[in-house]
């Protein structure tokens, strides 16, 4: 246990000392903010207000305000979810650097199990992700409250921290698998760019899953990304969603949640929170095992 602590601490310090790495880890958050507020946000707000306007007796001004807050909360939920990708990528980039500089081979010669070494890299990436994603949650919640939204309850905060932990585990193990396959910083950067680009699409950040064709939506549901995003969206939009759609038939709200990816379904079955969490944890476990096998195979071929 002491060996794991030392290795994890060493990897974690490398990431936290690099101010540039932390900045670029948060860069995706600012990119999403720019996209939503200058390009995509208004379209979503207009879509919601247009839907509400179909029902008589509505307060158009209040509906627009609620719609803006709902889209804001929905956007922030996506940011908290996908930030785990850039954070774990930045953290595990030091594994690539260790390999290129020969430090990893030196670490392997130490009387430490390779399982402990691998766990040290993954655990450091996980801790980094939990810290930065929690910071992202705090920043986005403060901004939402300043815009007029109610702060999340204590229970909601506990749930969101649990979602952050599970989501971070999945991406930490995914990036460990990528780091195990990548042979150089160039390959790592290329693979990281592809994953970073795809995750915004797969998580329904740029286009809600309900706007995709059935075939594309089916492909998206085969990845863990959309399940993590759905967990945060369901919790972070719950209160403002109730206020926005107050007095609206339940079937309309259900359809809205389906289109926006707040709730996911397989066939006619709507997935519960435990089911979505299970998908994340199972995928994370598979990534971890596959990454461990890839590292062992890669070491053999390098001899």
Image (tube, rainbow, N blue to C red):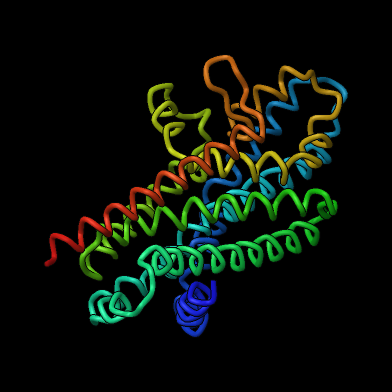
Residue placed farthest to the bottom in the image?
A: 17
**Between 14 and 120, which is closer to the camera in this rendering?**
120
User: Which residue is found at the position 71% from the left and 33% from the top?
Assistant: 49
The image quadrant of residue 252 is top right
- On the image, the x and y values in percent for residue 242 come to 81, 34
In this picture, is 237 found above or below 187? above
202 shown above or below 268: below
Quadrant position of the C terminus in the picture: bottom left
Which residue is pictured at 69% across the width and 39% down the height?
Answer: 234
Q: How many marks?
A: 0
Instruction: Work out whether residue 94 can be spotted.
Output: yes
Residue furthest top as drawn: 268
- Residue 282, percent from left and from top: 49, 40
Q: Give 102 or 78, whichever is nearer the viewer.
A: 102
Q: Which quadrant is the N terminus positioned in?
A: bottom right
On the rendered structure, is 78 left or right of 272? Answer: left
Residue for point 13% across, 65% down? 302
Q: Is residue 52 above or below residue 294?
A: above
Q: Is residue 33 left or right of residue 85?
A: right
Asked if one can make out residue 23 in the rendered structure from this viewpoint, the answer is no
x%, y% of residue 76?
64, 53
The spot of residue 69 in percent (x, y) is 74, 47
The residue under the point 73% across, 62% down is 143
Q: Is residue 182 above or below residue 55?
A: below
When asked about the image quadrant of residue 86, the answer is bottom left
Q: Foreground residue, 62 or 159?
A: 159
Question: In terms of image quadrants, where is residue 181?
Answer: bottom left
Residue found farthest to the front: 111
């Amino acid at each position: 246990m002491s060996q794991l602590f030392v290795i994890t601490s060493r990897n974690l310090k490398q990431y936290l000392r690099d101010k540039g790495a932390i900045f670029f880890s948060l860069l995706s958050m600012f990119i999403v903010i720019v996209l939503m507020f200058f390009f995509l946000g208004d379209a979503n707000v207009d879509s919601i207000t247009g839907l509400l306007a179909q029902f008589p007796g509505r307060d158009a001004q209040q509906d627009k305000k609620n719609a803006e807050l709902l889209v804001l909360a929905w956007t922030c939920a996506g940011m908290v979810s996908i930030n785990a990708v850039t954070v774990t990528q930045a953290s595990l980039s030091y594994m690539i650097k260790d390999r290129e500089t020969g430090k990893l081979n030196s670490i392997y010669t130490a009387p430490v199990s390779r399982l402990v070494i691998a766990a040290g890299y993954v655990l450091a990436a996980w801790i980094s992700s939990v810290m930065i994603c929690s910071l992202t949650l705090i920043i986005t919640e403060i901004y939402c409250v300043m815009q007029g939204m109610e702060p999340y309850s204590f229970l909601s905060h506990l749930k969101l921290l649990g979602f952050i932990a599970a989501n971070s585990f999945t991406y930490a193990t995914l990036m460990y698998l990528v780091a195990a396959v990548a042979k150089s910083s160039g390959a790592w950067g290329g693979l990281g760019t592809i994953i970073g680009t795809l995750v915004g699409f797969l998580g329904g950040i740029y286009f809600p899953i309900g706007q995709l064709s059935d075939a594309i939506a089916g492909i998206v549901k085969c990845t863990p990304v959309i399940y993590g995003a759905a967990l945060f969206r369901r919790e972070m939009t719950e209160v403002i969603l109730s206020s926005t759609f107050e007095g609206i038939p339940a079937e309309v709200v259900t359809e809205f949640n389906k289109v926006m990816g707040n709730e996911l379904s397989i066939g006619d079955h709507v997935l519960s929170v435990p089911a979505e969490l299970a998908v994340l944890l199972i995928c994370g476990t598979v990534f971890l095992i596959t990454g461990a096998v890839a590292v062992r195979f890669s070491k053999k071929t390098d001899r």
